[in-house]
Image: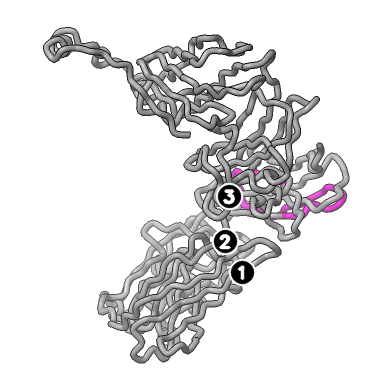
Amino acid sequence: MDFKIHYLNQTLSITTLILVYSCAAIQGPSGGPKDETPPELVQTIPSGGSIHFKSNRVELIFSEFVDANSIEKAIHVLPTLPEEPKIIYKGRRIFVEFPDTLIENQTYIISIDRTLKDEHKVALAQGIQVAFTTGDEIDKGEISGTVTYDKPSSIHLWKVQNEKDLTEFYQRIPDYVVDASDSGKYKFRYLSDGNYRLMAVDRSASGSPVSSDRTVYGIPWNPLIQIDDSKEITGQNIRIPNNMGGIKMNQAEWETGNWSTISFSENITEWESAVKIHAIYEDSSIHQPSQFLNILDGTKLHLTFSDLDKNQYVTILTNGIMQGEETIIDSGLIKLRVDTSIDTTNLSIKAPTKNFVLSIEEDNIIPIEIVFSNLIDSEKSQNSFALMQDSISIPFNSAWITPLHSTIIPLENWTPRTSYKILLLRDEIHPIFGQTLKDSVKTISFKTSDYQGYGRLIGSSSEKLSSKIVAEIASMEKKPSIFRSVVNSDGNFDMKKLPEGNYSLFFFQDSDGNDRYSYGRVDPYKPSEWFYTYPDTVNIRTNWDLELNSLKLEQHP
């Protein structure tokens, strides 16, 4: 909600103003430790919880001066008023003035979220709610839960007004809004009896109607929350996806010759074989270019075209991929200008990079990937490498996986914590475009790790299961590795050969049978799948079996 902020006027003559500024300016002391103490609400007039509210003003008094620029987005009156309240700022004191439209027997809440800061830009430690009512008593309904999301989030709550509002609620401004804490927790208080719809959104969309195709949101598994005799509704947990809708083709770039690259909004490694790219030439003929995934960046797909002739533009189309009712990849098209000029720079090595360490396994020979800056004629480049350990030549096999990258696999397994060299022979490497390597022999140095350790996770539910539950464990890394296992009907699961490390673990009811968590959707309305997040970090240790027993993996009212 947008507020009108007013400053109390002070009439000073210019002479007086100059005098005050030069002789009696009020400033914080210089030096000293940085102020990191959050502001606090120390008093409200009238006091919070007041009944029979007849005034048109509430005064908020803080422990220190607050930042005037933070007030507009921080203070809200809930439920939303048809006419905006007036906010008057005076240092430590803020006045909230209401229009003459307060409803009888209604509990109102002044909600102060964590965007409120003091004059040193220190934010509130947590959101604040102050309630008062025009009736005989303050409503006592509460809804609380936890939001799982990588970014700051807000929670929207609508009180359902009629049958039409059941499906169209999201198109209007929410009645109540709170911010989730840093740990994702939230609570609505002072709610009247009735039916409610709930949704969590990226904080950038806080307080606004929800766009079904643009707003990033998550929906709880409980489609309708009812407050009546049960005044405290807990456990309304929500997960928000990082992006809404399917993966999108969002960029195309012509590299050189007949080679181009298209980029997607997310990693498509899992769906590479299902993605089919077509090209429309200027004579409206349809062609299917050769395609392969970028081994270093799973969001990029490389294309090579044939019979371009004199085409100045090519329109690239990608097919849509659906899994049940869920869109995995959106269909799309991009018109791209053809640039068949040839790159004349020398070939370079994209991977391995300097100080690269190859993670190896004891019972499996892991290949090392060599990635080039330009397409290679693999037929002419079959004898391009030599593998050395010190001055000893190591027997190996090599294979061209794509025109941009090759693999080397020693006939006998790598030795742990050992230095190796790959020699690239300039005269044996033949790029399709541009020049070959600048040096006659290019040396790539790398080391091997210790053998990768693996552990095992065994779990069981406290009861037999009546629905399909999937266990998902994700490593706590910047680019997490994810492993999934179906929990059997007896409530047991067994996840073998998990790399050593720390993991997060959660379970979800796979209602749509696609082996992936479904966040729900607002149009047409569909609740999310039930889930349970294991509260502790799961530590997988080499050659250890970790057992988690008596897990509660059934949805209960």
Q: Residue at x 58, y 52 (%)?
A: 212
Identify which amino acid the numbered label 2 is placed on.
Gly
Q: Secondary structure at mark 3?
A: loop
Magenta part, dominant SS: strand
Outermost residue on the front side: it is: 100
Residue 444 appears anywhere in the view: yes
Identify which amino acid the numbered label 1 is placed on.
Ile
Q: Quadrant of residue 256?
A: bottom left
Q: Which residues are magenta?
A: 485-507
Q: Residues within 10 Å of mark 1 (few under 14, many from 20)?
A: some
Q: Secondary structure at mark 2?
A: loop
Give percent across and percent down for residue 123.
43, 25
Residue 505 included in the magenta stretch of the image: yes
Outermost residue on the top side: it is: 24
Q: Is residue 79 above or below residue 390?
A: above
Q: Residues within 10 Å of mark 3 (few under 14, many from 20)?
A: some
Residue tagged by mark 3?
Answer: 241
Q: Residue at x 54, y 30 (%)?
A: 81
Residue 540 appears anywhere in the view: no
Q: Disc number at residue 246?
A: 2
Residue tagged by mark 1?
Answer: 321
Residue 61 included in the magenta stretch of the image: no
Give percent across and percent down for residue 287.
49, 86
Q: Is residue 181 above or below residue 539?
A: above
Give percent across and percent down for residue 320.
58, 70
